[in-house]
Image (cartoon, coloured by chain):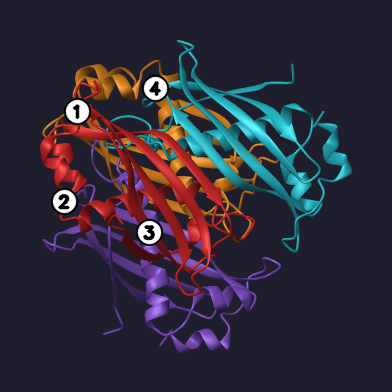
Chain colours: A purple, B orange, C cyan, D red
Amino acid sequence: MSFVSETTFHVRYLETDAQGVVNHAHYVAYLEEGRSSYIRQRGHSYAAMERAGHVLAVTDLQIHYHKAAVYDDRVTVRTWLGETRSRTLTFHYQILRTDSGEELVSGMTKHICLDRAGNVSRIPQEWQQWIE
Amino acid sequence: MSFVSETTFHVRYLETDAQGVVNHAHYVAYLEEGRSSYIRQRGHSYAAMERAGHVLAVTDLQIHYHKAAVYDDRVTVRTWLGETRSRTLTFHYQILRTDSGEELVSGMTKHICLDRAGNVSRIPQEWQQWIE
Amino acid sequence: MSFVSETTFHVRYLETDAQGVVNHAHYVAYLEEGRSSYIRQRGHSYAAMERAGHVLAVTDLQIHYHKAAVYDDRVTVRTWLGETRSRTLTFHYQILRTDSGEELVSGMTKHICLDRAGNVSRIPQEWQQWIE
Amino acid sequence: MSFVSETTFHVRYLETDAQGVVNHAHYVAYLEEGRSSYIRQRGHSYAAMERAGHVLAVTDLQIHYHKAAVYDDRVTVRTWLGETRSRTLTFHYQILRTDSGEELVSGMTKHICLDRAGNVSRIPQEWQQWIE
């Protein structure tokens, strides 16, 4: 099976809403945190990739919400790569309440590689190091 | 065809990211704005619904990103209802760059009705007024 | 007295927090909205300024919170210029609940002009048009 | 000298803006993270305090911006208590770039204790444990 990264952090107060739970919008930030962490744990840096002139733009986002987190919960984002092609790649995610292990959210983001001019580009060779 | 609401506003600077365009996460807020506006334009208020003891929790979110918006762009969110059942309903969205009419984003959110205790509940009778 | 801009919008649901009111952090976005609106109403565009190679970086922020807003409240941001110097300027703000006129927040941001390289720069001549 | 908490985390991509650096608004979230962490490190929980019926509403916010952080920077928030009275307390903050030790931001928030009904209240006895 492919590499799965894990990163754990606390829910911030401002991520809650008037329902008393984490607003659904903030899980998008949690997925991003999972993605950043995945790349770091593979020994690379998305920041370095951007400085080298390529970005991974998000083209699709899907989130399924199972249970709600509340302020101060610790949450763990598990992230792994799905289908990768020459110009696109897909990340999958699972967010758990760290202490109970309950699944809160599952999700997927699809990305396309763009160059500095905004044109679709092949994913550069050096990125292949962390994409099996 | 069903009722379609439209609401138009400017992109905020803090919604942009280091790629110079609106970060993909912020479109979730734009969808929410579309949804609030839809309910208002049907002559109702989501705030009043909550005070009456029911919430519409988000269970699924899907967004497809077509083109990017930048700071100070005017964007228009078009919102309409999809499938509605006794306990769930679905909103569909299209976000356009107001001045050019280009489609930036299309999306969907699915909701389930919960009572104050967090239990799944039938959508109350008075809500049916704005759900055909 | 100097020009005062006004812009009015609805509180978004995700701007609330578990206390049921707008989280204090989001008023910073409201001030930014006031500032953008101020510049637009003076017939200029902050986006155009940036494209011309200068930015107004925030160096100081002060907010005093008087009363809380809730979801779906309409809020009006009143914005005016304070002290302006060759390299810095100050905006003042007042946020009101539109319907009642109650003052919710008062605030101030101080800005310094930077060029593309990040060096402190004189505020360009053409910006002086909207700065008395 | 009083207790100083430290908490360290990475800048998220969506916290950057089109200037390529962390948008000034997001430091308010970093201060909140510092405050939550301070209370945790004193062996208490703000969540538990709220469940017991009291909140600490923010009445004043001041931030001075010295240097900018970028995506993937590690930042450390140092937090300590300032003046405390029977109904109010003040937190002070310093945010550093973890790797270089450079000061990015200094700030202050002032809080007032409210009960469930929103009335000003004495800070409860049990909170005094983490307030010298």
Q: CA–CA distance between discs 4 and 3? A: 29 Å
Q: CA distance from mark 3 to mark 1?
A: 27 Å
Q: Secondary structure at mark 1?
A: loop
Structural crowding at the residue carrying mark 4, measured as other residues with C-alpha within 10 Å and reported as few (<14), some (14–19) or many (≥20): few
Q: How far is disc 2 from disc 3 in space, using C-alphas?
A: 17 Å
Graded by Cα atoms within 10 Å as few (under 14), some (14 to 19) or many (20 or more), the crowding at tag 1 reads some
Please state which of residues A115 and D102 is positioned toward the viewer in this rendering. Answer: D102
| Same chain for the residues under marks 4 and 3 in the image | no
Query: How far from the left and from the top, in percent, is residue B66?
Result: 57, 54
Task: Choose between A59 and C34: the one closer to the eye.
Answer: C34
- Mark 1 or mark 2, which is nearer the start of the sequence? 2
- Contact (Cβ within 8 Å) of mark 2 with mark 3: no
Task: Name the residue at the top extreme.
Answer: C100
Q: Which mark is residue D44?
A: 2
* Residue beneath the point at 27% across and 35% down: D56
Task: Examine the image and state in which quarter residue B123 appears.
Answer: top left
Q: Is residue C87 left or right of residue A114?
A: right
Residue assigned mark 4: C67
Mark closer to the chain start, 2 or 3: 2
Disc 4, disc 1: CB below 8 Å?
no
Residue A108 visible in the current orientation: yes
Q: In the image, what residue type sits under mark 3?
A: Arg
Disc 3 target residue: D78
Is residue B80 visible to the viewer in this orientation of the structure?
no
Please tell me the numbered disc located at residue D122.
1
